[in-house]
């Protein structure tokens, strides 16, 4: 995020030592383990609420029921791979309607871009599965091993029976959560009560056990061991999210115009930052927010709660670290450039700020895209056909010359019925006079001699259909024809265009 540079310090800090030549830098560096400290505050409470909501939905949704009638799965949300159906409450999608799923993914992507342009990495800090499960795993870790200092001491201590017991208890709890997570994911593709019973009794298929083990292992490794490395090295989102941000995006920021120069709480001529590192100790990725916008920052805002606690203890205004726009940071710094630290500098810096601009060209574009895609999907859903017909012309041979000199074309006709009813439909042909329609193994005919075809309830019915031209009809090499399915009232229920092929004149 090179284009999102933090404002310059009000007072220059000592220059850092010259970096080592590139040739002397190691190609590999050991991981510096992060020990995030527990923190309380408004942001943390919001994160707990979001965590509970996300986990609750994930674990509970597969168990919700939705009555669709007999012979149909009653699970509210189910990806039924065996029967090629996707059930979502009252909506049932067929494989050829995958565009609805694609549209939902496009909507989600545009919504993510819009949220990022407004609030920075809000998704990463609050609702990303990696963040949610890592938060849960760290909460379990604190319950068993203690907070930051206790965990650091435990890791440095020699291996004793007590240490083995605490480590074993933590990993057992992690594996339990990971197994519940992997099992819940399997339930989105199988009936939840049935697959749970099969997994517990050892009667599930090898495929179920494979994916159960796969998702259990990935949850355990990513949330328990990899943690911040997923966000820093594996996730592509931080690499291009800067393109979604601008100077009016609300991001977690350190107000350097107020905090610098850093110094002891009772020292004279210093800013509000006392260099306590409370913000660093609570950061789940182990960064220092005072260094400005960084790729590793997930925007969780826990540093805000930690810093506010210190400011409250010192009797100073909260908000040294806050959700702030870069334009406000620059305006405040320009306003206090010639003022020493103190109440006057704080007052003038805060007065220079402006309310974040929510409505701006970038957000209007995202809003327009969301509206367009959402309206297109809603229109497609409302106009969605419940009965359709597909006509496939034979390819080998494309036509057959009959003994009397006539020409016959063969077709495969497929009727897709997305309702629970089984209507009987009359098949009619719109074609030049003289062409005759026949159906292999036909059912009864209606009063006008049109063959009657039965549609399968919530299924696909297939028929072989032939169109024959008598000798001497004088058709072109390719003649357009239309197949129509008529309901009991004679209305067109579905239609499909095709062609009738013959020899060259």
Image: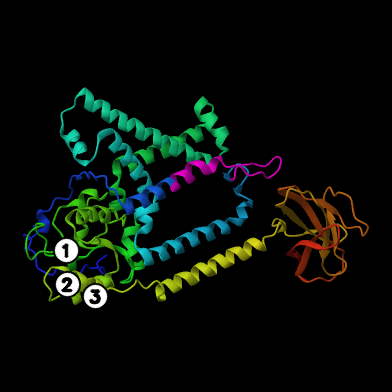
Q: Quadrant of the N terminus?
A: bottom left
Q: Closest to the observer: 312 or 58?
A: 312
The quarter in which the C terminus is drawn is: bottom right
In the rendering, at what x and y percent does residue 246 appear? Answer: 32, 71
Q: How far apart are the alpha carbons under marks 3 and 1?
A: 15 Å
Q: Please tell me which residue lies in front, 236 or 135.
A: 135
Is disc 2 surrounded by few (<14), some (14 to 19) or many (20+) residues within 10 Å?
few
**Residue 331 image label:** 3
Q: Is residue 223 left or right of residue 77?
A: left
Magenta stretch? 53-76
Could you say which quadrant of the image residue 323 lies in? bottom left
Up-down relation of residue 248 to residue 183 (above or below): below
Q: Nearer the viewer, residue 239 or 338?
A: 338
Mark 2 highlights which residue?
344
Residue 126 shows in the view:
yes
Residue 501: assigned label: none
Residue at coordinates 17% horizontally, 47% vertically from top-left? 29
The CA distance from mark 2 to mark 3 is 16 Å
In the depicted structure, whether residue 259 falls above or below residue 40:
below
Q: Which mark is residue 259?
A: 1
Element on which disc 1 rests: helix
**N-terminal label among 2 and 3:** 3
- Discs 2/1, front: 2
Q: Quadrant of residue 253?
A: bottom left
| Nearest the eye: 160 or 305 | 305
């Amino acid at each position: 995020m090179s284009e999102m540079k933090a404002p310059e310090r009000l007072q220059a800090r000592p220059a850092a030592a010259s970096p080592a030549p590139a040739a002397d830098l190691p190609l590999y560096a050991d991981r510096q383990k992060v020990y995030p400290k527990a923190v309380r505050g408004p942001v943390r409470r919001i994160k707990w609420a979001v965590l509970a909501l996300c986990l609750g939905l994930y674990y509970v949704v597969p168990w919700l029921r939705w009555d669709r009638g007999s012979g149909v799965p009653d699970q509210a949300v189910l990806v039924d791979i065996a029967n090629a159906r996707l059930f979502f409450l009252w909506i049932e999608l067929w494989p050829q309607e995958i565009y609805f799923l694609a549209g939902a993914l496009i909507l989600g992507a545009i919504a993510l871009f819009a949220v990022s342009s407004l609030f920075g990495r809000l998704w990463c800090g609050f609702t990303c599965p990696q963040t949610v499960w890592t938060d849960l795993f760290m909460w379990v870790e604190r319950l068993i091993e203690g907070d930051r200092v206790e965990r650091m001491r435990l890791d440095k201590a020699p291996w004793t029976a007590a240490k083995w017991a605490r480590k074993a208890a933590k990993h057992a709890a992690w594996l339990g959560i990971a197994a519940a997570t992997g099992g819940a994911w399997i339930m989105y593709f199988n009936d939840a009560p049935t697959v749970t019973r099969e997994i517990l009794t050892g009667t599930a298929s090898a495929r179920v056990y494979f994916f159960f083990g796969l998702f259990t292992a990935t949850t355990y490794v990513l949330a328990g061991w990899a943690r911040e490395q997923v966000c820093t090295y594996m996730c592509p989102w931080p690499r291009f999210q800067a393109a979604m941000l601008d100077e009016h995006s609300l991001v977690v920021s350190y107000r350097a115009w107020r905090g610098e120069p850093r110094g002891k709480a009772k020292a004279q001529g210093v800013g509000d930052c006392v260099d306590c590192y409370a913000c660093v100790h609570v950061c789940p990725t182990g960064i220092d927010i005072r260094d400005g916008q960084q790729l590793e920052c997930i925007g969780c805002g826990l540093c805000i709660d930690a810093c506010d606690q210190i400011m409250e203890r010192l009797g100073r205004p909260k908000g040294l670290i806050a959700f702030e726009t870069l334009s406000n940071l620059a305006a405040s710094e320009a306003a206090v450039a010639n003022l020493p630290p103190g109440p006057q500098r704080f007052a003038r810096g805060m007065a220079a700020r402006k309310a974040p601009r929510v409505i701006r060209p970038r957000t209007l574009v995202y809003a327009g895209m969301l509206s367009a895609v959402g309206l297109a999907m809603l229109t497609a859903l409302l106009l969605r056909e419940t009965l359709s017909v597909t006509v496939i012309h034979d390819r080998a041979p494309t036509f057959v010359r009959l003994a009397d000199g006539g020409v016959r074309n063969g077709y495969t006709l497929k009727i897709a019925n997305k309702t629970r009813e089984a209507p009987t439909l009359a098949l009619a042909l719109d074609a030049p006079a003289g062409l005759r329609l026949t159906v292999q193994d036909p059912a009864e005919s209606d009063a006008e001699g049109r063959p009657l075809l039965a549609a399968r309830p919530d299924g696909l019915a297939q028929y072989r259909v032939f169109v024959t031209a008598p000798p001497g009809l004088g058709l072109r090499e390719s003649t357009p024809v239309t197949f129509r399915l008529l309901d009991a009232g004679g209305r067109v229920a579905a239609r499909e265009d095709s062609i009738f092929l013959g020899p060259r004149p």
